[in-house]
Amino acid sequence: MISALADRALGLGPGRVRYTRTTVRTPMADGVSLVGELYRPADGTGPLPVVLIRTPYSRSAMGHPLFAAPLARRGFQVLLQSTRGSFGSGGQFRPFRHEREDGLATIDWVRAQDWCDGRIATTGISYLGHTQWVVAGQADVVAMAAHITASRMTDTFYPGGAPTLLNALSWSSSIGNQESDLPLVPHPVRHRRLRSALRRMPLQAADLAVAGAPVGFWRDFTGHGEPDDDFWESTYTERTRDVPPTSMVTGWWDLFVAAQMQDYRALREAGVDARIVVGPWLHGAVDELREVLRTDIAFLDHHLRGGPAPEGAPVRLYLQQADQWLEFDEWPPPAEPETLHLGAGGALGSGVGSGSSAFVFDPADPTPAVGGPLLQKPGEQVDQKAVEVRPYVLVFTGPELAADTDVVGPVTAQVFVRPELEYADVYVRVCDVDAAGVSRNVVDGIRRLDPRTVPAKDVTRGPDGVLAVDLELFPTAYRFRAGHRIRVQVAGGAFPRFARNTGTAEPLGTATTGLRCRTEVLHDEAHPSRVTVPVLRRS
């Protein structure tokens, strides 16, 4: 009865296989052992394929009900293992530092056991996806299901060079407290401490405020965020074997979606059998987890047990504001680029604009971020009034749309700027303004300007000293409805989602001062600042 209720809550059909659950310990080369639980069909069937799940989170509160048990109830043999230094496994949990070596050692050990027939597949979300990607090119696994994650996850900590402050400190608080927390119990006091800690300077010791002790990840994040620091590169190696068939699920409001869509495209270009589903979800949303399980069951059954191939096209996307699912054979799908030029007086249109505008960013009163791809609510789409009423946020608004406009694919921008300081940020956000005048965010992107990285392939300096800044905004599948208007915000930051730019060369973790910076945005014929959106044309 309990299993049936669990399956119903997860949106699955009934799983009727009885299983056993045994604690196992996997030895590492340095003498550390990693603890895990082996799920096997109770009928004592001989050697079977293994689904490996490696997690730094609670096996009992998260791993068992959400991942291992649903698969075990459908006859899969599963090893749910705690990563180094977490929930009984030996050693110290140092995120992103040990997963390749420990993952490869675990796979070798599993393959040598008499209950494994030699075939191993992997699955998991977020950090559990990282544990798969770091072995994907080196371990002989049959299939990989890496969801709401990225092959180079640490690159997403500093998109465009701007540190993702809110997500990083939120995760530091979570992992710093997880072994003493009651699962799924809200912590309002800790949330208030988090909001307060985000504003402190210097940032290096903010982990003490939210976790009561140093958190290794936070110290790494704040200590290695400079553009010439290659600390995180050691978490990756060149792939020596092909990546196996791969299944992915993510959401348009997930912090990793931009990188994951790039991963999907790279896999397909390399000839890998890859599939992806993108829904209207924030990171770890309940409906997203249901989709993960649904796709995993079909995908793993096909690759481990010879079941039918997953149905449908390899790319399945939810078209937001249309309540439709679209299917394509490729990403991005065929679309026509439509250019929207910034213009004088806050105009946004197809023709090149004129004149210039300016914004000011003050680290003491940073431009706020509202909504967007975050680890937790309040993310997703949010009314932008609190941002757009600020005097130093530039707003450019287009005319009413005569027909529904479906934007599907990557969104880009090029903005021509003349900042007063060498250290400055350029932040661009595309919004949907409804018939009542309410503006809601759709996609955005940021670029941190730093003399150590300017000029670069995405920042060039013209003979007049003006910087042409190219930005990769998040991808989307979104319908701007007839009668709505498209709006573009341009500002000098989005705090606390991104760390404030202090306007100085002080490092992220130790900076204590800040300078106001005025940035001129040019939008004339010589400097055609613009946003380009891919518009889906359907007959």
Image: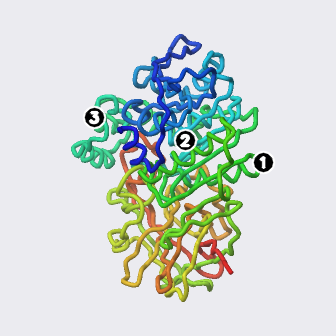
Nearer to us in this view, 154 or 107: 107
Of marks 1 and 2, the one in the foreground: 1
Callout 1, which amino acid? Gly
> How crowded is the residue under tag 3: few (<14 C-alpha within 10 Å), some, or many (20+)?
few
**Sequence-wise first label, 1 or 2:** 2
Callout 2, which amino acid? Thr
Residue at 63 percent of width and 76 percent of height: 527
Between the C-alphas of marks 3 and 1, the distance is 45 Å
**Sequence-wise first label, 3 or 2:** 2
Residue at 46 percent of width and 75 percent of height: 432
Please, which residue is most extreme toward the left here? 189
Between the C-alphas of marks 3 and 2, the distance is 28 Å
Among the 4 quarters of the image, the one containing residue 418: bottom right
Q: Position of residue 301 (x, y in %)?
A: 62, 40
Q: Are marks 1 and 2 in contact (CB under 8 Å)?
A: no
Q: Which residue is mark 1?
A: 271
Residue at 33 percent of width and 44 percent of height: 201
Q: Secondary structure at mark 1?
A: loop
**Sequence-wise first label, 3 or 1:** 3
- Residue 107 seen in render: yes
Q: Which residue is mark 2?
A: 154
Q: Is residue 172 above or below residue 353?
A: above
Q: Secondary structure at mark 3?
A: loop
> How crowded is the residue under tag 2: few (<14 C-alpha within 10 Å), some, or many (20+)?
some
Q: Which residue is mark 3?
A: 182
Q: Is residue 417 above or below residue 216?
A: below
Nearer to us in this view, 135 or 325: 325
Callout 3, which amino acid? Leu
Residue at 36 percent of width and 70 percent of height: 383
Q: Quarter of the image containing the N terminus?
A: top left
Among the 4 quarters of the image, the one containing residue 536: bottom right
